[in-house]
Image: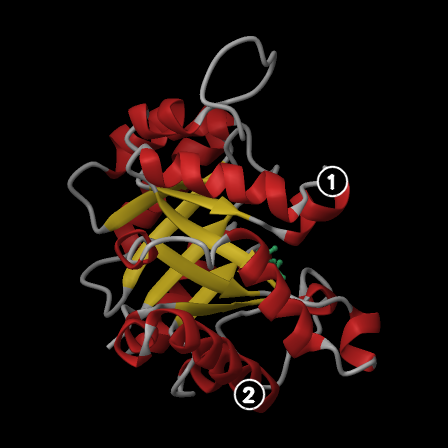
Amino acid sequence: MAKKIVAGNWKMNKNLQEGIALAKELTEVVKNPNCDVIIGTPFIHLASVAEVIKGSCIQLSAENCANKASGAYTGEVSAEMVKSTGAEYVILGHSERREYYAETPEILKEKVELALANGLKVIFCIGESLEEREANKQNEVVKAELAGSVFHLSAEQWKNIIIAYEPIWAIGTGKTATADQAEEIHAYIRSCVAEVYGAEAAAETSILYGGSCKASNAPELFAKPDIDGGLIGGASLKAADFKGIIDAWG
Ligand code: PEP
């Protein structure tokens, strides 16, 4: 059985003090959840938030890392640096990084490899644009994204990969994929994983849904057999909203 996970992605929101306050609030309100709970924060928050959540059920993720190991790359943050803060995860392949920062499948492949080599688990995002969905190309798109950046990994490395299916047309738009639409493509993604790593590994791979997921629609989405949780943007910025989604796991 795949692990159930609710992961937040704060994106470029919250200054350091606000981020620490939100992390503290989460440690107070999230107790004994029926899923793993991860918060993805900006780089500068990581070390401080790691201290705040120590001993709680909340785990920590970065939202990115460099595709170089170290050296003269001004402004970049390496996977090793991320790991040294206490973070255990990194979100890679988010559509905003692909679109606004020109992150290609090759660059993402390098980032994934460095993240894994430094002991981080990767939340790898895939998903189609509205035009691609309208042309019924969503399956092709997600399969190519997987093949381009993560399907070369060994079976051992694959154990540290979490997939987040995030249709771009649903991110921050208030438009959610219906539970049936999401289930259909999640099942397809799992079948792609099974083709490469086998049925057992596919069943153990967590596949999260992302895109305007909130407390009101999470129960219906999470009830689907191939949806193992959510990657949450906007609704991860308020403790009550995020907890509402975590509570969808009962
Ligand atoms: C995201 O960008 O990862 C996301 C799911 O955003 P939102 O929940 O705001 O749609």
Q: Is residue 101 left or right of residue 197?
A: right
Image location of residue 178, percent across then percent down: 61, 85
Image location of residue 208, percent across then percent down: 45, 68
- Which residue position is annotated with label 1? 102
- Which residue position is annotated with label 2? 184
User: Where does the N terminus fall, quadrant-wise?
Assistant: bottom left
Residue closest to the eye, 157 or 6? 157
Could you say which quadrant of the image residue 242 lies in? Answer: bottom left
Which residue in the rendered view is the most extreme toward the bottom?
180
Residue occupying the point 49% across, 60% down: 231
Q: Could you tell me which secondary element the residue under label 2 belongs to?
A: helix
User: Where does the C terminus fall, quadrant-wise?
Assistant: bottom left
Q: Identify whether 14 is placed above or below 223.
A: above
Q: Identify whether 92 is placed above or below 163.
A: above
Residue occupying the point 51% across, 24% down: 68
Q: Could you tell me which secondary element the residue under label 1 belongs to?
A: loop
Residue occupying the point 36% across, 25% down: 80
